[in-house]
Image (cartoon, grey):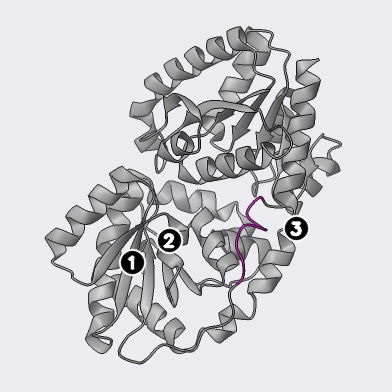
Amino acid sequence: MRYFFSTGEASAELNAVLLARAITRYDPQAQFEGIGAERMRSAGFSLWRDHTGWASMGPLAAIPRIPRLLATMWRTALHLSAQKPELIVLVDFGAFNMRLAKTLRTRLQYAEPIMYLFPPATWLDKEGVARAVGALTVPVTAFAHQYDFYKSHQLPIMFFGHPLAGQYALRPPRAVPLRDGGTIALLPGSRAGELKYHVPALLAALKILRVARPHLRAVFGAAGAPSERIIARALKRARVENVTIAHGVAAAIEDADAAFVASGTAVLETILAGVPSVALYIVNPMVVGYGRRMQKKIFQARYITLPNLVLGRELVPELLQDDASPEALAATMEALLLDPSQQYQQFAEVRERLGPSNALDDCAKFAVALAKAGAR
């Protein structure tokens, strides 16, 4: 059967690839097409459109992209209406995917199954958004909190657990690294804005850390070739040595004692893998007010990183905007390297809260069942 995945950034693309691989266990002849980037292309997808550069940080940065995204949305809707794949899978990226679903259903009278993995407004409890998602798609959430919210309003939703829950093995606790060394992963994110602000901050923090830890190694995790080029140029400008660039989160954290991570799915990946972490997020000062208003709506303004949201308490230190100074980043990382045990002891609880380790398989079975319904 034919499956079309629509993603808008690296984390959604990762989940799309994981789900597609799981689908092939139950539909070995499955064909995959979609909107993605090099990760999906490498996994055997036929790319309908490349989403590189689509994701933005804040509404001001999104404005110049709107005309192109609207045009792409309409072309995609017409393409899907003509091709009628057995299943469309929307992954996160609500600004685009909700418009795509609405256009298909209301303008083009599309009747085939549309599944929404990671539906929008996960932590905001917006009844209007939930009703729209439920009316247009079959929502599949990765979080029990969102499942309970939909059910409280008698809205359809499925919950199998988080697709990443069974993808990382929690490594045994490591010995505390030597006082003059260690290895840290630097995960600055995948969006252009994230790289612009996070890479210089992380390099400055690394320089401070190396005053006391001259043998400290660092590994940048690049989300793709464009990110790798940006990081390489920054390293050359900053004249920082003994830093390597790895492809993706898993490769960057493989030998890391701890990690700096831009808030997002990558924080969840590091915690599931058993790597103590410090989260950061810095945006253009022009959108700081917007970001703070959004944060106030999320769990009483206390947290923004996924492990902290899942637990309802601070597990991962969050250094945001002005608090993410090189000095503060370095001091927080130094404290973590000296005593990672307190954070590590809570990792198993995060995994438990995310649901069973077979969540991805169950989600794949459900997707194949939807596709079969579409085929009939």
Three-letter code for the amino acid on which mark 1 is drawn: Val
N-term-proximal mark, 2 vs 3: 2
Quadrant housing residue 218? bottom left
Q: Can you tell which of label 1 and label 3 is closer to the viewer?
A: 1
Could you tell me the amino acid type at mark 3?
Gly
Q: Residues within 10 Å of mark 3 (few under 14, many from 20)?
A: many
Q: Is residue 266 above or below residue 11?
A: below
Q: For marks 2 and 3, give the one nearer the viewer.
A: 2
Instruction: Determine the residue positioned at 28% across, 73% down.
Output: 205
Q: Secondary structure at mark 2?
A: helix
Foreground residue among 134 and 58: 134
Image x and y of residue 350, in percent: 67, 67
Q: In the rendered structure, which segment of residues is drawn in magenta? A: 163-170
Q: State the predominant SS element of the stretch in magenta.
A: loop
Q: Do the CB atoms of the residues marked 2 and 1 lie less than 8 Å apart?
A: yes
**Residue 96 position within the rendered picture, expressed as x and y whole percent measured from the top left:** 52, 28
Q: Which mark is residue 251?
A: 2
Kindly give the residue lying farthest to the bottom in the view shown. 179
